[in-house]
Structures are given as C-alpha cells and as structure tokens.
Image (spheres, coloured by chain):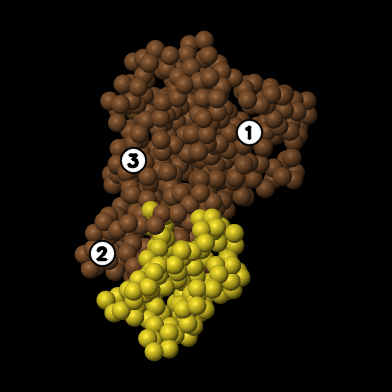
Chain colours: A brown, B yellow
Amino acid sequence: MLKFPIYLDHNATTPCDPRVVEAMIPYFTNNFGNAASRNHPFGWQAEEAVDYAREQVAKLIGADPKEIIFTSGATEADNLAIKGVFEMYASKGNHIITCNIEHKAVLDTCKHIEKEGGEVTYLKVKDNGLIDLAELEAAIKPNTILIAIMYANNEIGTIMPMKEISAIAKKKGILVFSDATQAVGKIPIDVNKDGIDLMAFSAHKMYGPKGIGALYVRRKNPRVKVTAQIDGGGHERGMRSGTLNVPGIVGFGKACEICINEMEEETARVSKLRDKLQNELLKIEESYLNGDKEHKLPHVTNISFKYVEGEGLMMGFNKEIAVSSGSACTSASLEPSYVLKALGLGDDLAHSSLRFGLGRFTTEEQIDYTVEQVTNTVNKLREMSPLWEMYKEGIDMSTIEWAHH
Amino acid sequence: MAYSEKVLNHYTNPQNVGTLDKSKSNVGTGLVGAPECGDVMRLQIEVDEATGVIKDAKFKTFGCGSAIASSSLATEWLKGKNIDEAMKIDNMEIVEELHLPPVKIHCSVLAEDAIKAAINDYRVKNGLEALKFDESIVH
C-alpha cells in the first residue's frame, strides 16, 4: 500500500534514520553533560561520545578525527572555510576561484569577501554542469589562495572532477575547499585521494539531525589553518567556539556510521530506481535531462518538461508527491534557477524543470506512481498550454514578440 | 505556500480551455506574458455581432496554478458580458475572488491584460481604434 505524501526531495533534507534518533536520545536526558566540563563524569561522558562521533565522521571521509571541526551545519562550515582562509592567508594573497553554480552559502560568502577587498573569479560551468579544467588553470594568479568548488551540485547532482581540480591546485600550492553537502554519505569520498584541504558537509542530508555539520580541515601536507569566525571558549581547537551540540554530534556520527556500512548497497538500489524514473520520464515528448548524465549523484535527476511551467506542474500532484522545481514563480524576483541558467538553459526550460531526489526509504512502488502522476499532469497541462499548441502547429516561438513584464 | 480552495478548483477543473477560430472577424485574441517569465496567457472572446455580447470565451495558459485559475475565472466572467462591461474587469477582483497572495498578484494582472488585449484585437479587426489602457499597473 502506498502511503502519502511520497517524499522525493532528499536533496533538500532527509528524514532522520530511526537508528540515529535512538543513538541521540540518551544525550538529551541522562547524558546531558557539557563536553567541555573536564572535572566530572557528566562532562567525561559527553566528551567520550563526541570523540566517538568524531571518529565515525572522520572515517566516512578518510580523515583523521582531529581534522573534524563541528559546526551548526554546512552553511556555517562554508563561511568558516572561505572567510577563515581569506583572513588566515591574507599575507599570501586575496584571490579565490569558485564557480557560478555553487550553493548560495558559498556564493554569498564570496560576495562578502569581495566587499572585504578580496578578489573572486566565478568560473562558468559548461552546459553539462561541470567546470572546464583548462579555464580553472588559466584563472590561477600569483595571489590565488583558494579554489572553492562544490563536490556535487544540489540542483542537478553533477559531480565535479575533484581529483583533477586538486592536482591543478597542488602544482601551484593553492588550497582546495569543497562544499560536499550533497555528496558525503552518497558516494565514496576520501579527502586524501581527492586532495581536498577543507570540506564542508552536513548531517541532515544523510539521515542525521538538522543543526549539525562539520568542516574538515587538513592537518598534514599541508597543515591548514582557518581564522575563527565565532569567538568564545576556544572549542574545536579554537576554530569554532560554542558549547558542542552533543546529541546532534552523536546523531551525526551514527548517520555517518550507517553510511559507511550501507552506502554501497543503498547506492545500487537507489540508482536503479533513479534510472527507472529518469528513463520513464524522458520518454515524455520534449522532456530534457539537465546536467551531465554520467558524472552524477546516484539519487537525483533534474528534468525539464518543455511548454509546462514547473510550479503549475507540481500543483498537479504536490499533495501526494513532494519534489522541487527550478521555476521561481513564488519568489518575488520571478527569476528561475541560476544553476539551470548557468547550464545555458533558456529561462523557459528553467521554468519547466523538476528535481527528483530519491532516498533510503524510497520504494519502486513510489517511483511507478510518480512516473504515472507526472506523465498525466504534463499531458493535462500541455492540453491547456498555448506554447504546446504553437509547438504542435510548427510556429517558431522565437519570432513572436512577447510582452515582457 | 498553500493554495486557496478556489484556485485548486479552477486548476483541477479549468473552465473554457480551448481555442477559438482566430480568423473569424468576431473573435478577439489576446496573448500576453512571455515564456522566459514563466507565464503566457492566451485569452479569446467571441462576440455576438448583433448584440455586442461576448457569447464565448476560451483560454490556454502556460504558468503556475494561480495563472491557470486567473485565466479560467476570467473566461467565466467574460461570458455574457458586453465589451464595455468586460473592460471594467479589474485584476483586484480576481485577486479577491481567488484569494491570491501578494506574490501571485501578477497572475491576475496578466489576466486583466489578456482581456484587454483580446478586446483590442477584436476592435482592430472590426475597424475600430485600439484602446489605450491605463499603464498604472506595475508589472
């Protein structure tokens, strides 16, 4: 029996795995100690739990536990990495290279850096959503201190060539930071093999709780330092003050442990469902896949259904199926997704896109139902779309003088 | 953002979806919006030449649920009105009827624009001057 609503928006957030919740519960009540209380068993117990979680988190990304700085989430980790490097390495230079489909937590932080006198290059991605390595190399200047490229994109799921990016950076002695929020726990990541010096990620994207994330900061070859952005009691080796969120950290650790043990099996199962969904939906006339087909996370697909508007499309089934759209009909700006536009999609196709994010608890039955509902709604809305009618009549829509508002 | 019951009803059961023969002299067609903006409305009226009353109205809309509902409602209101009455339909009446939230007011503006564009098309086809409408509405 299908239960509604069906959740296919796992790139936005994921439910907590019940095993994660179970691990967290004692740390709200009995084991409530402050991990910084050094002089009594309550503190020791909390500290021990944090140390254990730190090991679990580090193991998932091939890091040393000492290289994990807990933060409130990936946004804070992005801020700490970029602002922290900018301030710490000011004597070496002030130029940062990033790309134009980064998450706003990176892009807006880079905007802030520019206001502070920094220089930022925003690489344009190719139409498959990947950066051009030759362009990256050409963008490097004597004052470049950081390359900040996301591991995988949140809207289209494309995976950047991190190894190649870090190889270029290493030649020039530049640090590499990656926002890996969407990728950690979904695909195998090893910060040493990938050559990453700083990496941000978050628990709630991998079946852990909200409000906890981490910044990986390399300690060897090279030893990386960031200037703290939050001052206080000197927690997290002075890089992030503030009482540790012990239950959150315990949950984060458990979530990472589950990913270590189950990622391979889960990826095989989920990517099969994703492929089915993607293949079935691409059978719809005039539907287009957004982003690279191969270099892509196993659980996401982003498709534009031409001549149908995304929000209107979601309305056809959003009481039963939760997805997200690159259309920005609800936003005041009326601007569609900057990520899709960066791929060179016209605004019309960007408005027509849906993102499907599958997850640990997605079933084949849910996928079959989704295919049916999306297909029916696309067909129904095309029947009332003047653009579809024009397309069917062979009218060249680029010759029409549209009344732009 | 939750949709009002009335928007949902129009979305689920849109009224007067379709196409009128635009080559006929008594049919006026208004096409407003742009694909890049995420909404395009085509609204058509068929006028009874003897009485000047709108005897049929049809729409097709590319857009969100509120845009579809606004155009569906507009066609309902147009039928049975004469041109002068039709010109008086104000976008705020659509907003009130459908309980559109502020971010969706532009959908009602588009519907009003579509009505006026259809009326002007009808007027021009019948040797009348296109009317100039107040441009005070901020798009």
User: Which residue is found at the position 30% from the left and 66% from the top?
Assistant: A388
Task: Rate crowding at label 1 as few (under 14), some (14 to 19) or many (20 or more) other CA atoms within 10 Å.
Answer: many
User: Residue A391 — which label?
Assistant: 2
In this view, the residue farthest toward the top is A91
Q: CA distance from mark 2 to mark 3?
A: 28 Å
The residue to which callout 1 is attached is: A50
The answer to which of A40 and A102 lies nearer the viewer is A102
Q: Which quarter of the figure is the C terminus of chain A placed in?
A: bottom left
Tell me where residue A254 appears, x and y as whole percent: 56, 42
Q: Nearer the viewer, mark 2 or mark 1?
A: 2
Q: CA distance from mark 3 to mark 1?
A: 37 Å
* Dot 2 and dot 1 within a common chain: yes
Which numbered mark, 2 or 3, is in the foreground of this view? 2
| Marks 2 and 1 close (CB-CB < 8 Å) | no
Give me the residue at 42% from left, 43% from top: A338
* Disc 2 and disc 3 on one polypeptide chain: yes
Query: Which quarter of the picture shows residue A342?
Result: top left
Q: Is residue A326 above or below residue A191?
A: below
- For the residue labelled by badge 3, is the local secondary structure a helix, a strand or a loop? loop
Q: Earlier in the sequence, mark 2 or mark 3?
A: 3
| Subunit of label 3 | A
User: Is residue A248 found left or right of A55 in the rendered image?
Assistant: right
Furthest toward the left, the residue is A394
Crowding near pointer 2: few (<14 within 10 Å), some, many (20+)?
few
Q: Amino acid at mark 3?
A: Gly
Tell me residue A229's x, y (percent). 63, 25
User: Does residue B71 appear anywhere in the picture?
Assistant: yes
Name the residue carrying label 3.
A129
Where disc 1 sits, the SS reads helix
Ranked by sequence position, the earlier of labels 3 and 1 is: 1
Question: Where residue A124 appears, x then y in whole percent?
Answer: 35, 34
Q: Pointer 2 indicates a residue of which chain?
A: A
